[in-house]
Image: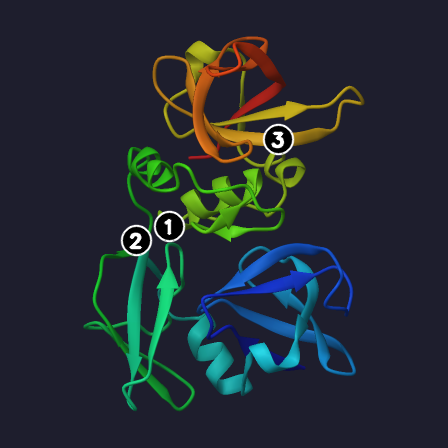
Amino acid sequence: MKFGICILNAIPLRKEADDKSEMVSQILFGETFTITDSDNNWFKVNLDFDNYEGWIYINQINELSETEYLKIKESNSHTLNELITFLTDQNNNLQTISLGASLPLFKDNIFQISDKIFEMEGMVNHGELLKSNLVKTAHLFLNTPFLWGGRTPFGIDCSGFTQMVYKVNGYSLFRDAYQQANQGEVLSFIEESEPGDLAFFDNEEGEIIHVGIILANNYIIHCDGKVRVDRLDHSGIYNVDTKRHTHNLRIMKKVI
């Protein structure tokens, strides 16, 4: 078994071993994975954070020994809580990382991955935070453009958005909306919900295709073209700009 870690801000996770293949997700800085297969210059990987699978290009990763991998995987989780910040390594090379990056073995603004020692400044979250922090984090993503498979403030999809908001605050959600819909406790009415709960929406075939984070006073923040705030009622999402319903409400869930 081989292991690896992402040491770039975000790398594409593709459906097939091809640059032209669909990007199904992204691996963010500091996220680890197991390598399950290879095809020329591509590795098939399974992500530790959400068990998502896909193909990544071999020159965009840093392989880890089993000892390094287990040390990082078993360490306490730290997550960047800044839209963007800078890292410098021991050779004064500069690179950027963004909101939701994982910081393995982080202590006193310093951490090490293999032979690289990184130093940074910025807000870092550790452990599970209060549920009220979810809404604050969600608003950091406002106006982020929609990007299929995206998980960063530079481009994100609906389930990537909810997953990353929860991740920054110390909680794990699955990657896709239909998977997230299987987590947590069902809510019967909007009035039972709290800010930070999740609302899921389906298509005409009854398939879960969209998710957003419930806010106070019957509002919802979600990614539809961009991360935006709209109204939420018993029918679904009411777009405040177009003045029409855009998504059909299927179920609401309390995860924390």
Q: Residue at x 59, y 12 (%)?
A: 245
Where disc 2 sits, the SS reads loop
Q: Nearer the viewer, mark 1 or mark 2?
A: 2
Q: Nearer the viewer, mark 3 or mark 1?
A: 3
Tag 1: residue type?
Val
The image shows residue 25 at horizontal and vertical percentages of 61, 55
Q: Earlier in the sequence, mark 3 or mark 2?
A: 2
Q: Earlier in the sequence, mark 1 or mark 2?
A: 2
Residue behind mark 2 = 81
Q: Are marks 1 and 2 in contact (CB under 8 Å)?
A: yes
Q: Quadrant of residue 59?
A: bottom right
**How many discs mark residues in the rendered view?**
3
> Relative to residue 231, is residue 64 depicted above or below?
below
Task: Indicate which disc residue 210 carries.
Answer: 3
Tag 3: residue type?
His
Q: Is residue 131 visible?
A: yes
Where disc 3 sits, the SS reads strand
Task: Indicate which disc residue 247 carries.
Answer: none
Residue behind mark 1 = 168
Give the distance between the C-alpha atoms of the residues marked 3 and 1, in whole angstroms.
21 Å
Left or right, 199 with reference to 25 = left
The image shows residue 84 at horizontal and vertical percentages of 32, 58
The image shows residue 123 at horizontal and vertical percentages of 23, 57
